[in-house]
């Protein structure tokens, strides 16, 4: 019965379409997105950056008020005074240029946050997949330990009756000892992975008991996949937003030669007389805009180079993972899990019925268990690759 349950378990792992598994990982990622401290900091920093950008294009500058009293010989107190209330403005076209620049900067800030969020959630998803692998490995080791206990009891009985040698008895004991060691290592790795994902969840516990992987998307043909990456990769989209923002910054800085305007109210008093008037003036920025355009152009060139590098790196990295995933999918289809697990069950029955020697059993069984372990590792690697290939959908 235990072996039949194990066979059913492995078949369900191959299917990888269990709805509960998909719901569980979605729930875990939603918790981490809400509770992760790094993401909370990134959200606040993004909000602060957006607010700072929005305040940089005020239509008017601060109000300036100045009062100057004058004193003269033979006059008690203030003989005359001057009150000036003024306000400065940039040239109107500058506000339009800066408004467009701020829109690009807002987009750049949003893309950068999305990229950082994706990387954090991808890290969490890979941890989840590792815990699923360890849970599946734990289930296999528990089944294997039950078999080892039954065989040890059988060998001890035969040894007491003179039907087994001390070498066979020691082999049975060593096999159980090795399995217990593997189980202890598995539990230590599971605890470490759970602690890591709890840390990503803001220190709050995360319960992951699934032994099955969530359903994965089909691998498309390479040309379709490359088009998908070019259109959706967040590292490329973030770099594109930086290029757009840097290009608009050049246009903004090219208008720095435009004069600044100043208007205001002026009141002069002299003894019992007072006069009122308006203040209109301009200031020409001869030196304040010096080299700003060159700086913006250099920043734009760097952004273009970064975009080209992001595209090249993304496509090369994803192509490599794509080919590995396709190869692993083909290899996994070659594994006949029901055959291997059924063979283990048949070997155990043959030993119990005296049709197969203990030593021959361990030779055959060890080979099958090694193949099962290789399958589980390759399957985990496949799901890791698929998570990385579709990381931009997190």
Image: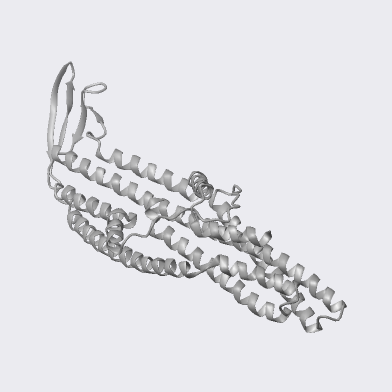
Tell me: residue 258, above or below residue 225: above
Residue 177 seen in this snapshot? no
Q: Quadrant of the N terminus?
A: bottom right
Q: How are the colours assigned in the image?
A: one colour
Q: Nearer the viewer, residue 160 or 134?
A: 160
The percent position of residue 85, horizontal first and vertical second, equals 22, 28
Q: Nearer the viewer, residue 234 or 361?
A: 361
Q: Is 217 displayed left or right of 311 in the figure?
A: right
Q: Is 314 displayed left or right of 290 in the figure?
A: right
The total of numbered circles placed on residues is: 0
* Res. 298 image quadrant: bottom left
Q: Nearer the viewer, residue 385 or 232?
A: 385
Q: Residue at x 41, y 66 (%)?
A: 325
Q: Residue at x 47, y 67 (%)?
A: 332
The percent position of residue 120, horizontal first and vertical second, equals 45, 54
The percent position of residue 21, horizontal first and vertical second, equals 53, 50
Q: Residue at x 32, y 56 (%)?
A: 233
Q: Residue at x 37, y 60 (%)?
A: 219
The percent position of residue 333, horizontal first and vertical second, equals 46, 67
Tell me: residue 145, above or below residue 291: below
Residue 119 seen in this snapshot? yes
């Amino acid at each position: 019965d235990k072996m039949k349950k194990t066979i059913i378990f492995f078949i369900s792992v191959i299917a990888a379409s269990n709805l509960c598994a998909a719901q569980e990982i979605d729930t875990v990622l939603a918790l981490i997105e809400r509770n992760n401290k790094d993401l909370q900091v990134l959200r606040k920093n993004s909000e602060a950056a957006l607010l700072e950008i929005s305040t940089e294009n005020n239509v008017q500058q601060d109000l300036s008020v100045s009062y100057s009293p004058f004193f003269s010989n033979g006059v008690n107190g203030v003989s005359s005074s001057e009150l000036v209330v003024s306000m400065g403005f940039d040239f109107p076209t500058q506000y339009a240029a800066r408004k467009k620049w701020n829109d690009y900067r807002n987009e750049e800030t949003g893309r950068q946050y999305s990229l950082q969020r994706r990387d954090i959630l991808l890290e969490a998803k890979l941890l989840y997949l590792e815990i699923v692998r360890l849970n599946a490995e734990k289930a296999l080791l528990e089944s294997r330990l039950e078999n080892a206990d039954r065989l040890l009891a059988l060998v001890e009985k035969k040894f007491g009756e003179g039907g087994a040698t001390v070498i066979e008895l020691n082999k049975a004991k060593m096999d159980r000892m090795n399995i217990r060691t593997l189980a202890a290592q598995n539990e230590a790795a599971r605890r470490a992975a759970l602690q890591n994902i709890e840390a990503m969840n803001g220190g709050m516990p995360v319960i992951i008991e699934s032994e099955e992987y969530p359903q994965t998307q089909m691998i498309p043909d390479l040309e379709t996949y490359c088009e998908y990456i070019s259109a959706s990769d967040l590292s490329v989209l973030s770099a594109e937003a930086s290029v757009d923002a840097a290009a608009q910054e050049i246009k903004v800085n090219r208008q720095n030669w435009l004069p600044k305007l100043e208007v205001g109210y002026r009141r002069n008093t002299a003894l019992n007389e007072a006069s009122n008037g308006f203040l209109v003036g301009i200031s020409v920025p001869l030196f304040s805009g010096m080299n700003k355009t060159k700086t913006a152009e250099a920043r734009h060139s760097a952004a273009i180079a970064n975009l080209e590098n992001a595209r090249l790196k993304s496509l090369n990295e994803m192509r490599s993972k794509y080919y590995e995933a396709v190869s692993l999918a083909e290899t996994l289809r070659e594994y006949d899990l029901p055959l291997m697990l059924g063979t283990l069950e048949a070997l155990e029955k043959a030993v119990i019925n005296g049709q197969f020697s203990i030593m021959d059993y361990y030779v055959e069984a060890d080979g099958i268990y090694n193949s099962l372990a290789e399958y589980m590792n390759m399957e985990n690697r496949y799901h890791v690759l698929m998570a990385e290939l579709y990381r931009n959908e997190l």
